């Protein structure tokens, strides 16, 4: 199955660190998706590119039948342990193992930027029933905080690629692609602010779980994380604090299968 090389190298061997370091999604965002996509008993929903199940475990509360699709074995191992009630399948977005029009809803959290945009939207449109809902979700770093913006620049310099910049600095391209696809009817966007409380080491560990830091050579990785520690020690909003709120904006792009 097709897997982006950077994603495979960055996430395949670091599933436990990813699960521990990454934030969850805010309850209002999950409530919004549940209502917008009509999740509930009798519905079948796929969490595509599910990773370690950060979103999957939250969807269990909807009462829907949840299927988690994830191509990387290391991620699936953590996912299966964290979400014992979910069906877990090995699958990539461009070749889904589901019957045509067999799903009531599909969500992609923190993963759509790794997919082939057109091929994955074609497949998603195929497996969703008419009227089925799609939500593309990102926990985006809130660069309004100067220390977060500075940290973002460090990570960009450590491993800058078109995919990384597209996925982490701007997601408007995803809404544009969804709006342009003939299989979907319009796009609704919404945003939810939240924060992950971490100590200084926790912030560094969170940054270390980004795919390009994990995939970088040891020297680049060590230099980048040292630069992050320096930012935290110098910025007035983080220096000397026992707990640091790492700010996020959860962005959602939703549509309906025609």
Image: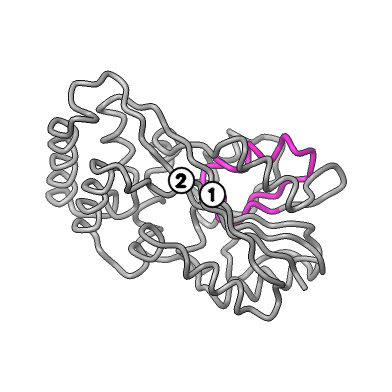
Q: Position of residue 72 (x, y in %)?
A: 49, 54
Q: Position of residue 253 (x, y in %)?
A: 59, 59
In the rendered image, which residue does mark 2 sit on?
Answer: 249
Toward the viewer: 237 or 82? Answer: 237
Q: Which residues are magenta?
A: 46-68
Q: Is residue 26 left or right of residue 129?
A: left
Mark found first going from the N terminus, 2 or 1: 1
Residue at the image position 64 percent from the left and 66 percent from the top: 187
Q: Position of residue 84 (x, y in %)?
A: 67, 34
On residue 7, the disc is none
- The alpha-carbon separation of the residues under discs 2 and 1 comes to 6 Å
- Looking at the rendering, which quadrant does residue 65 occupy? top right
Q: Position of residue 13 (x, y in %)?
A: 38, 47
Residue at the image position 79 percent from the left and 43 percent from the top: 64
Q: Is residue 189 left or right of residue 207?
A: right
Residue at the image position 19 percent from the left and 21 percent from the top: 240
Toward the viewer: 206 or 232? Answer: 232
Picture quarter with the C terminus:
bottom right
In terms of secondary structure, where does tag 1 sit? strand
Magenta stretch: residue 182 in it?
no
Q: Is residue 7 above or below residue 57?
A: below
Toward the viewer: 118 or 52? Answer: 118
Q: Is residue 219 left or right of residue 248?
A: left
Do the residues under discs 2 and 1 have CB atoms within 8 angstroms? yes
In the rendered image, which residue does mark 1 sit on?
Answer: 191
Q: Is residue 191 left or right of residue 233?
A: right
Label 1 Cα neighbours within 10 Å, binned few <14 / some 14-19 / many ≥20: some
Q: Is residue 45 above or below residue 118?
A: above
């Amino acid at each position: 199955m097709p897997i982006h090389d950077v994603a495979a190298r960055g996430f395949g061997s670091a599933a436990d660190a990813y699960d521990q370091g990454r934030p969850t999604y805010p309850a209002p965002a999950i409530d919004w998706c549940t209502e917008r996509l009509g999740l509930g008993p009798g519905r079948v929903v796929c969490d595509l590119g599910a990773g370690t199940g950060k979103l999957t475990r939250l969807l269990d509360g909807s009462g829907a039948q949840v299927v988690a699709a994830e191509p990387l074995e290391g991620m699936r191992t953590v996912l299966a342990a964290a979400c014992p009630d979910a069906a877990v399948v090995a699958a990539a977005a461009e070749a889904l193992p589901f019957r045509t029009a067999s799903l009531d809803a599909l969500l992609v959290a923190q993963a759509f930027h790794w997919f082939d945009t057109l091929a994955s939207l074609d497949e998603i449109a195929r497996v969703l029933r008419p009227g089925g809902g799609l939500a593309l979700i990102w926990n985006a770093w809130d660069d309004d905080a100067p220390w977060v913006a500075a940290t973002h620049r460090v990570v960009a310099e450590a491993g800058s690629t078109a995919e990384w910049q597209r996925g982490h600095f701007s997601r408007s391209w995803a809404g544009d692609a969804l709006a342009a696809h003939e299989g979907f009817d319009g796009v609704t966007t919404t945003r939810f602010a939240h924060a992950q409380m971490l100590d200084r080491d926790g912030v560094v560990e969170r940054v270390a779980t980004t795919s390009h830091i994990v995939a970088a050579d040891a020297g680049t990785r060590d230099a980048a994380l040292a630069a992050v520690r320096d930012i935290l020690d110098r910025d007035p909003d983080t220096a000397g604090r026992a707990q640091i709120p790492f700010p996020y904006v959860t962005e959602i792009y939703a549509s309906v299968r025609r």
